[in-house]
Image (spheres, rainbow, N blue to C red):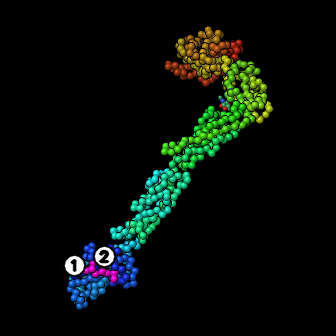
Amino acid sequence: ATKCWTEFIHFLLNTTTLPQVSDGAAAALPLHRRRRRSWVWNQFFVLEEYTGEEPLYVGKLHSDLDKGDGEVKYVLTGEGATSIFTIDEETGDIHATKKLDREQQAYYTLRAQARDRHTDRPLEPESQFVIKVQDINDNEPKFLDGPYTARVAERSPIGTSVVTVVATDFDDPTYGHSARLAYSILQGHPYFSVEPKTGVVRTALPDMDREVRDRYLLVIQAKDMIGQMGGLSGTTSVTVILTDVNDNPPHFPRKSYQFRVPESVLVTSVVAKVRAMDQDVGPNAEMDYRILDGDGTFRILTDQDTQAGLVTLYKPLDFETKSSYTLRIEASNRYVDTLYLSTGSFTDETTVKLLVENVDEPPVFSSPVNRMKVSEAAPVGSSVGTVVAHDPDSLNSPIRYSIDRQSDVERYFDIHSSSGLIRTNRHLDREISALHNITVVATESLDRSQVGKAVVLISVMDVNDNAPTFATEYQTFVCENATPGQVIEILSAVDPDEPVNGHHFLFSLNTETVNNLSFTLRDNNDNTASILTLRGGFLQQVHPLHFLPVVISDGGSPSLSSTNTLTITVCNCDTHGNQQHCSQGMSMQLPGIFSTLISIPLTCIITLLGTSSKLEK
Ligand SMILES: *[C@@H]1O[C@H](CO)[C@@H](O)[C@H](O)[C@H]1NC(C)=O
């Protein structure tokens, strides 16, 4: 029903067959003259970007009911009706009053109606139709992602893909060639090429060398109409950066180097620095260095920041022993690309000569630490030992020896200034100081500023010069109700001497008291002795204290002994032997003088004992 009243007039689909459009009327083509079958019934076509002065004729609506007598009125509604499109009420002619842009809006959907002019009654049902905007090539291709930066390894083979460029054309891709692009390279020949259809940029020369040129600026063009004359075009730039491969070996700028090194330089110091150059970069320029010959005095390692080789001292230098060294040093790339190994060796060699410089050195002792021994019994002036120092310089100055007085404030020792012989200057006592740590000084007599030092450790050897004594002050008591044979004390002893085989103390009662009828002593042969009662019936009132002289001998050679008097207090005890009451008081140390006796000659002790026995009576 729709078709029977509306006749649509179309443009042909292919613009090349269009007649010359000079004004609005000529732009339309009556349906009956159309030969192509590809038109669509309910579509009009209108050319975009029309710039003529007159409104552009789009087409004509016509109802079969229209007898041409002006009784029918055509009405247009929908998208752009009145604002863009106008219709002649009487003739049904449709015009576009504005320039259209397909890339903004490609279709307009409108409705048409035929009405009775007088009653305004619809004569036909409303019909919908489309005005399609016809594309012209009014958009040039654009590289939306450009400009590009791409990387490719130097020396890549011909045809290596670098990057793909893409241009976009907003014209109608389904119609004509307005959006069909062809890529070409405007700048970058002969190094690079671009595939016309795909936009893939490839290398076009072999052996492009980064070390010669590392960067190319390409200009790529995209042109529509498949690149033909009259097409629109756009361009983009591609910066191609060649990346490094290890195609250059290391190279020493010089075949030999010479350095001066003072002999006093410390071990681990850097004494020389050499650097092999490499045109590559990054890991491809990283170096390993090696000393090809050498006696182990030097080592070489790589400074990771500069890739220089640092020759480092590993053993002390001595000008007087060896005054120059010649080292052959090899540099090699740490990472080698096997592809380029065939182009030659990736190592280089140079010679480093090190001249050792003489330095005036202080005297040197034959040993920095010297151990000596001397007996504590040695008389003053005894030899202890000799130290030796010499001037390491060729001058070989005589040496004067002395003792650093800070290290021997008490002046136990002195040293012979020219022979280095150390002697005792005072009596030594191992029990006061068993080890003397003294510093000896050697001075060059020709240059007193050249001073060397050494430590001398003098051990004082023990002699048996101390007698044993009671280990503590015993507070011994005996109960009034004690029975004969009871152990009332176990004695032990101390001695400051240190015999090699340990102490073997011998305990006994002194000859005068061996016949004592109250107490006796039993040597337990384990450096202790037990004191036992010989009787019972001790009475505080009669005899509150008993004194028992005990002789302790250290069994050394010669043997030293002392007599130590044990004070025994008589106490009142309970049945368990716990003391209840001691008339003299347990803390009293009446004959204290005896318990502090240490090393008194025997004759002396006997005299004193006489005193003590008088006290006892
Ligand atoms: C001896 O003295 C020196 C310096 O005064 C010190 O370095 C060293 O450790 C001492 N040696 C001993 C065994 O005490």
| Amino acid type of the residue tagged 1 in the rendering | Lys
- Residue 540 lies in magenta, yes or no? no
Ligand 1 - quadrant of the structure image? top right
Visible residue check, residue 570: no
Q: In percent of the image, x 25 and y 90: which residue is there?
A: 70
Specify start and end residues of the magenta stretch as a single range: 26-34
Point out the tag, 2 or 1, that comes first from the N-terminus: 1
The residue under label 2 is which amino acid type? Leu
Considering depth in this image, is 189 or 167 the residue closer to the camera?
A: 189
x and y percent of residue 437 in the render? Answer: 69, 28
Judged from the image, the secondary structure of the residue bearing numbered disc 1 is helix
| Count of numbered circles on the image | 2
Answer few, some or many: residues within 10 Å of disc 2's Cα (few below 14, many 20 plus, some between 14 and 19). Answer: many
Residue lying furthest right: 446
Query: Is residue 595 or residue 542 the one in the foreground?
Result: 595
Q: Which residue is painted at 62% across and 40% down in the image?
A: 350
The residue identified by callout 2 is 12
Whether tag 2 and tag 1 are in contact, CB under 8 A, the answer is: no
- Residue, disc 1: 3
x%, y% of residue 609? 68, 14
Label 1 lies in ligand 1 vicinity (Cβ under 8 Å): no
Q: Position of residue 376 (x, y in %)?
A: 70, 20
